[in-house]
Image (cartoon, rainbow, N blue to C red):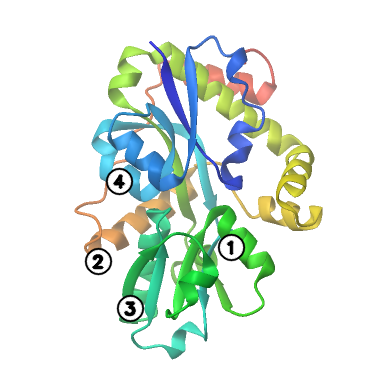
Amino acid sequence: MLLTLGQIHYTNTLPFFFYFDVNRLPVPLDVIKTSPAELNRKMKNNVVDMGPMSSFAYADQADHLLLFPDLSVSSYGPVGSIFLFSHRPLHTYREPSVVLTDRSATSVVLAKIILEKYLRLIPHYETAPPDLEAMMRGHDVALLIGDEALTAYRTNRMFYTYDLGDLWRTYTGHWMTFALFAVRKSVFEAHAHHIYRIYEALARSKWRHLSDPEPLVRFVASAHGGSLAFWRHYFDGLSHDFGEEQRSGLLYYYQEATSLGFLERVPTLSFLPDDGTLHEIQRNVLLGSGGV
């Protein structure tokens, strides 16, 4: 059976894939590159077996998913690629017209939590493709994520900008986790050995990047423009781990989303079972030996 792994075509997930070589895996695997929102839909519709997905989408599908340990896209403070753009300071609005990107789930709900609960605004929402100039024509505030947000932030000379990770830490003191790696339970049960090997390759790519960020920094600067210093700062602000602090922040986000009616309940974080295999994989990855 050919397994399918989703890949979000945003820079913030590249550490997992930069050294990930599907041709070296002893696993029949197809990698599908798409946007976060589309990947969420493909996971829900059983088109994709595993991959990075919006934290909010995980909550919606949690009963059918298992998480890959210690893999996420998180930040404590500025995330650098998720911004609200505004014609004037946010606190000066009462009922702003807010246009939301159609590429996200987690960030859309996060923006609503911040605007409605912490800034006490009464926004009117619309959704649109990620084009900042078009979004800001006739609207007060726009939300962009990912590489579109990075480009808009680097070139913006007109609008006030607010980093959602920074706002979240300011108001809650918590980490924010924007994306998680998950696999459908039925796929794991049928192909556990293959799933462990894929997890190991993703974890190995992450740790190889952390041990020497410069190759990825140079690659991204060449592909997207911007200085090496800009991209070093960007990756320094991200965490691709998922430890106790990140989990605590994510559960707090789920509590806030539930209290405002965006979720029915706070989901349980369920991980790949460990019969000793995960411990061995993590030991091998950290030692740089064995595996893919």
Mark 2 or mark 3: which comes first in sequence? 3
In percent of width and height, residue 65 lies at 31, 32
Task: Describe the element under mark 1 as helix, strand or loop.
Answer: loop
Pointer 2 residue: 260
Mark 2 or mark 1: which comes first in sequence? 1
Pointer 3 residue: 123
Query: Does 64 appear above or below 30?
Result: below
Marks 2/1 in contact by CB < 8 Å: the verdict is no
Q: Nearer the viewer, mark 4 or mark 3?
A: 3
Quarter of the picture holding the N terminus: top left
Alpha carbon of mark 2 to alpha carbon of mark 1: how far? 24 Å
Check disc 2 and give the amino acid type. Leu
Pointer 4 residue: 59
Marks 1/3 in contact by CB < 8 Å: the verdict is no
Residue at position x 51%, y 64% from top? 131
Pointer 1 residue: 78
Residue at position x 65%, y 26% from top? 286
Alpha carbon of mark 1 to alpha carbon of mark 3: how far? 23 Å
In percent of width and height, residue 81 lies at 57, 58
